[in-house]
Image: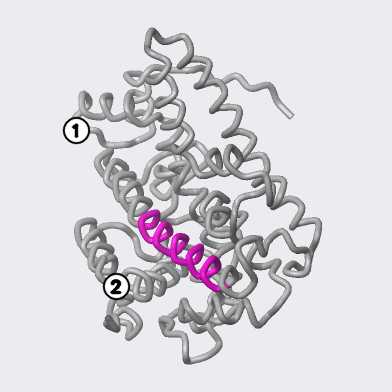
Amino acid sequence: MTTFNKPAISPDDQVVLLEARGLTINDRTGAQAFLRSVSFFRLTPYMRPFQVNSNHQFVPGTGFRQLAELYDFDRRLRLLVMDAIERAEVATRAQISNHMGASYGSHWYLQAAHFKNQHQQTRLLDEIREKQQHQLRDYHRECKRIEQLRASPDRKQALKQRRQKESYARHYILTYTEPELMPNWAMLEEITLGTLSHLYKNLSRDSDKKVIARALALEAPLLESWLHTLTVVRNICAHHSRLWNRELGIRPATPKSPRVSWPSYLRDDTRSLHTRIAVILPILQHFMLHCAPHASWKQRLFELCAEFPDIPLRAMGLPITWQNDAFWLQQPNY
């Protein structure tokens, strides 16, 4: 163990440091402006593919523009991925709500019989209860502020009624006493993607899981694995972290049945492909094909890659001819 002694330096000095490490910077003013908007620390992971030793020396000929373009590509890739995750997440919420609500009633999730692990069900109920209580506390604070306004009693009452309707969790606890917690369809819109993933995994009946997965053109083990995977990827994107060449730390399940289309280059047991963005893109494309076929997500992905032709595909786990695979050539069934 050693004592940390690295000094904090200004963007101007950061440019000097990068030049000393062999990075070509043709536009020093532009580089300084970039480093004022994107911190040196955030940019560091994008430098590593271009560095050759522990002294952080750059491969001869590497320019600052390459780092900036790589960062911009990754930023836009994350936005595209988040768009697809949102569609997949919303569709999954809807399918669980539609099936479980219609089959078992508006408050099915209050019944322990629907879950394999009662401890996890308790955590779910506690999360919903806390959301309702949080909204109730917010409502009472807002009412106190409304009471301090110079307005007529009727105006104050109208404002309070409007605040009550701004959140269903708030509306429910202020309107109903039984059951204590909100109905299925509202609960499924309130929980996080991570909680949604755990909820699906924890359903006690395989028959329910199969019906929900089938509505998304999937098998239950795939949907379970992919929800967990998308939770991890969403968290990466939500924190604006590097995605393009990241080792995800998880290995999503891949289709075993020909009923679920899948790229041929991912059907082999190639671990370097299954732990990078290469495996995430077809997962998202599957959801987009079945949940949002009009969104042209695949086309936007292709256009992004075409705009940045120098991005190394191998670092993403993608073969050079990945776009020509039969998986990516299939058309949606409207």
Nearest the eye: 262 or 160: 160
Residue 59: x percent and y percent? Answer: 36, 46
Labels 1 and 2: the sequence-earlier one: 1
The quadrant where residue 228 appears: bottom right
Q: Residue at x 64, y 47 (%)?
A: 128
Q: Which residue is at the far bottom? A: 258
Question: Is 113 part of what is drawn in magenta?
Answer: no
Q: How is the image coloured?
A: one colour
Q: Which residue is at the far front? A: 154
Q: Which image quadrant: the N terminus? A: top right
User: Around disc 1, counting alpha carbons within 10 Å, would you say few (fewer than 14), some (14 to 19), or many (20 or more)?
Assistant: few
Nearest the eye: 63 or 256: 256
Which amino acid lies under the numbered mark 2 shown in the image of this protein? Pro
Residue for badge 1: 26
Q: Residue at x 68, y 21 (%)?
A: 3
The quadrant where residue 284 appears: bottom left
Q: Residue at x 60, y 63 (%)?
A: 106
| Residues in magenta, as a range | 81-99
Q: Give the vertical position of 29 relative to 52 (above or below).
A: above
Of labels 1 and 2, the one closer to you: 2
Residue for badge 2: 293
Which amino acid lies under the numbered mark 1 shown in the image of this protein? Asn
Question: Is 91 part of what is drawn in magenta?
Answer: yes
Nearest the eye: 276 or 315: 276
Residue 20: x percent and y percent? Answer: 36, 28
Q: Which image quadrant: the C terminus? A: bottom left
Magenta span dominant secondary structure: helix
